């Protein structure tokens, strides 16, 4: 009994002491931090920060199987997860002009159509039971297939992933469903004015028949058969036309063995040809174009012209130029948004692509009666960055914004691995991003003005307005004597076939 009483007394004493200690500590912390905060308060411009630490790539392994499949392996044991992505050298830009949409349909049907050994429903069931996924897609410049799995389910999930890549069933039933869904997308494509602007602007820059601007129509969709899908797949899906990257919680030796087991016997195509990237040229050199949408109270505006690619040695200076124009404190924000009050958001960016010219594109949304003033304000800022040297403050702001955000390119190993794969896919050096970082650091005010003069073409600016014609006052003829209307009526299958 005495021991029991002593124990109870000890527990109560400790609890009481903890309570008192907590009060004392809370008081001291509050007092000290309040005093320090008052004594050491500084203006944000006076704050000093240590330099960002040097970024180092996580260790990875690159190997090539006998059948030509390039494999990247990067371990990450933080969580019991494994994910992988395959990049296939294909893309919608390679499909025939009379069957636009074929690549997108093929990319979706690879997964939704199941495999030779597993129906789509069975495939879904197995994956859902394991909280795993296998997905496929084909975009403008590449095909992709990916998987996500718990480490304990890796062999099963990777096996299904390999099946989808090598033995897709391409069932007619699922093809019909995909085409029905695509028709729904066509029917709704004019519901969003921003999407109208983006779609029609690409046609003005690249040309309506360019593989970088053409759109799926009912007639082109109707022409796509199962045989077309199979032929498209068989033209590009080979191990020697692919890069596979896997990151996560795996044993490298076991992972290499699994890849060899599931994909090592996949026959390569020794005659597969190198992708011929379609040529690009400017479709329009200037002009004002208009899409009338009477229901709108705002105008969606895009102006710009053809741009360039990431390989351009001037890209780092152009990136700094982007920083001067954009963001809180950027010229467009300060002038067009804050001083003139013409738009909540406004931007102007040199937007390159990996292996074909991107665009210089500026724009935003503004009220209908401010449309002309908004376009003129954008044009004025484009000319100003050519003719008026940026200040040292602007340069430092733009460079610091770019360099400080550099770390977000390496938030996790999967992001880093994806970047390495893309660089190899498009023929860039593995350290491209670090070269870019050094070039940004070395950029001067003169460099920014030089690239602005060299690459921005105010005389070639194409202007597109999607808005309410009767509400736009003053009218768009204040910008140009000729304003070209664009008809976005969706043609039906029979009308297109006759044309």
Image (cartoon, helix red, strand yellow):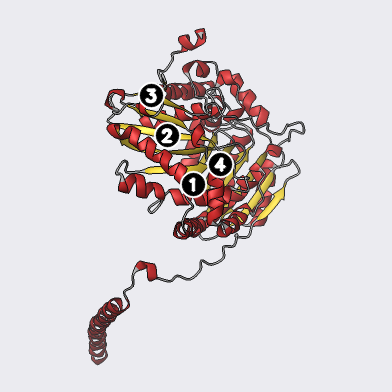
Any mark on residue 302, and which? Answer: 2
**Marks 1 and 3: which is nearer the front?**
1
Q: Sort mark 2 into few (<14), some (14-19) or many (20+) by Cα contacts within 10 Å.
A: many
In three-dimensional space, the C-alpha distance between marks 4 and 1, rounded to whole angstroms, equals 13 Å
Identify the residue under disc 4.
455
- Return the residue nearer the eye: 462 or 258: 462
Q: Is residue 246 left or right of residue 182?
A: right
Task: Give the quadrant of residue 426.
Answer: top right
Identify the residue under disc 1.
387
Q: Sort mark 1 into few (<14), some (14-19) or many (20+) by Cα contacts within 10 Å.
A: few
Query: Which type of secondary structure does the marked residue at label 1 adopt?
Result: helix
Q: Is residue 334 left or right of residue 435?
A: left
Residue depicted at 68% across the width and 31% down the height: 276
Q: Is residue 477 left or right of residue 323?
A: left
Q: Earlier in the sequence, mark 2 or mark 1?
A: 2
**Marks 4 and 1: which is nearer the front?**
1
In three-dimensional space, the C-alpha distance between marks 2 and 4, rounded to whole angstroms, equals 18 Å
């Amino acid at each position: 009994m005495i021991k029991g009483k002593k124990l109870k007394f000890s527990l109560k004493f400790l609890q009481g002491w903890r309570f008192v200690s907590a009060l004392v500590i809370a008081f001291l912390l509050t007092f000290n931090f309040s005093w320090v905060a008052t004594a050491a308060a500084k203006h944000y411009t006076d704050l000093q920060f240590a330099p960002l630490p040097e970024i180092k790539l996580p260790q990875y392994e690159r190997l090539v199987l006998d059948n030509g499949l390039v494999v990247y392996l990067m371990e990450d044991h933080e969580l019991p997860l494994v994910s992988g992505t395959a990049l296939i050298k294909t893309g919608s830009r390679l499909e025939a002009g009379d069957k636009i949409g074929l690549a997108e349909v093929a990319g979706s049907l690879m997964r939704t159509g199941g495999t030779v050994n597993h129906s789509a429903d069975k495939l879904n069931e197995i994956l859902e039971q394991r909280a795993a996924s296998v997905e496929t897609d084909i975009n403008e410049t590449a095909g992709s297939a990916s998987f996500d799995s718990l480490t304990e389910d890796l062999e099963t999930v990777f096996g299904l992933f390999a099946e989808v890549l090598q033995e897709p069933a391409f069932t007619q039933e699922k093809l019909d469903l995909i085409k029905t869904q695509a028709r729904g997308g066509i029917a709704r494509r004019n519901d969003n004015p921003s999407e109208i602007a983006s779609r029609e602007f690409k046609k003005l820059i690249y040309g309506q028949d360019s593989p970088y601007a053409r759109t799926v129509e009912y007639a082109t969709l109707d022409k796509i058969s199962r045989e077309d899908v199979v032929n498209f797949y068989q033209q590009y899906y080979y191990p020697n036309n692919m890069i596979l990257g896997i990151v996560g919680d795996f044993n490298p030796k076991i992972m290499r063995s699994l890849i060899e087991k599931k994909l090592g016997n996949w026959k390569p195509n020794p005659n597969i040809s190198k992708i011929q990237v379609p040529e690009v040229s400017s479709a329009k050199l200037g002009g004002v174009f208009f899409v009338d949408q009477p229901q709108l109270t705002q105008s969606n505006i895009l102006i710009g012209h053809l741009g360039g690619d990431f390989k351009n040695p001037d890209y780092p200076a152009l990136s700094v130029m982007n920083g001067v124009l954009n963001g809180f404190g950027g010229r467009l924000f300060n002038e067009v948004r804050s001083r003139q009050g013409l738009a909540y958001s406004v931007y102007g960016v040199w937007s390159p692509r990996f292996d074909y010219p991107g665009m210089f594109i500026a724009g935003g949304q503004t009220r209908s009666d401010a449309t002309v003033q908004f376009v003129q304000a954008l044009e004025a800022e484009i000319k100003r960055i050519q003719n008026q040297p940026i200040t040292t403050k602007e340069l430092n702001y733009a460079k610091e914004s770019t360099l400080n955000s550099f770390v977000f390119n390496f938030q996790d190993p999967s992001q880093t691995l994806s970047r390495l794969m893309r660089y190899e896919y498009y023929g860039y050096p593995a350290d491209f991003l670090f070269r870019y970082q050094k070039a940004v650091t070395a950029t001067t005010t003169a460099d920014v003005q030089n690239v602005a003069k060299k690459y921005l073409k105010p005389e070639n600016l194409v202007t597109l307005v999607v808005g309410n014609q009767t509400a736009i006052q003053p009218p768009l003829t204040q910008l140009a004597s000729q304003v070209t209307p664009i008809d976005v009526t969706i043609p039906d299958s029979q009308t297109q076939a006759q044309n």
